Amino acid sequence: MLAPKEDRFARQREAMVKEQIASKGIRDPRVLDAVRRVPREKFVPSSELPEAYADTPLPIDCGQTVSQPYMVALMTECLELQGHERALEIGTGSGYQTAILCLLCDSVYSVEKHPELSDKASLVLQEVGCTNFRLTVGDGTKGWPEYAPYDAIIVTAGAPDVPAPLMEQLAIGGRLVIPVGDAYSQVLKKIVRTQEGYESHNVCGCRFVPLVGEYGWTE
């Protein structure tokens, strides 16, 4: 499944893990292994192929981006995944983060606003061997209530505040990771749902494309 141990991108992939991710403090061995196994080059446009393993976000269709590798790893590590989780992703995009989640969770549900991105991501995810995912097109700020509650929720776009439906769809003990702030900069927040309510922790500053929807930004 996913990237073979040896291919023409193998050295770039290993260098990315060592120099961009592990060196910056990502320690979860399951996260490092997942990032090492997912062929990032499959999830970027052909015009961006030379930069597939660069330490930067890359543009994809519909004005969206595939996040910087370190940010993908950091957000994933914040979810504290053990393997049994039902995860919700808001913003399928290229499907790269989805593929990481597929390796680390029991099942992955992902919502994308743009049909063309969702369709393409589905094809690439199948191509690389992912099977435990389900995609839909819609307003990600409303979550995906049909399959709630979720043990982990990850939002790959910046919101003005945490959408209430996502809070409601988080299981007791579940973790939600989301960038919150204005249109130009955000703070990455980790929210844990407890029996008593919600605990919020600031992780770091970040910058994402806007989360558009009823509980996010307007167009």
Image (cartoon, rainbow, N blue to C red):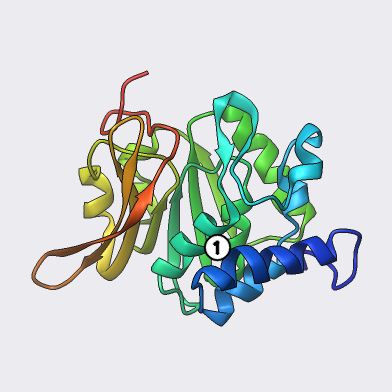
Left or right: residue 75 versus residue 4 is: left
For disc 1, the marked residue is 101
Q: Quadrant of the N terminus?
A: bottom right
Using the rendered view, name the quadrant where residue 7 is placed: bottom right
Q: Residue at x 90, y 70 (%)?
A: 6
Left or right: residue 3 versus residue 153 is: right
Question: Please, is residue 27 above or below residue 53 in the view?
Answer: below
Q: Position of residue 169 (x, y in %)?
A: 28, 55
Number of labelled discs?
1
* Residue placed most toward the observer, 204 or 145: 204
Outermost residue, top side: 219
Outermost residue, left side: 196
Q: Position of residue 19 (x, y in %)?
A: 65, 67
Q: Residue at x 40, y 67 (%)?
A: 79
Question: Please, is residue 163 above or below residue 16 in the view?
Answer: above
Left or right: residue 209 versus residue 70 is: left
Give amino acid for label 1: Leu
Q: Residue at x 37, y 18 (%)?
A: 219
Query: Which element carries disc 1, helix, strand or loop?
Result: helix
Q: Residue at x 63, y 52 (%)?
A: 55
For label 1, count other residues whose C-alpha is less than 10 Å away and answer few (under 14), some (14-19) or many (20+): many
Using the rendered view, name the quadrant where residue 48 is placed: top right
Q: Position of residue 28 (x, y in %)?
A: 51, 79
Q: Position of residue 103 (x, y in %)?
A: 61, 69
Using the rendered view, name the quadrant where residue 15 is placed: bottom right
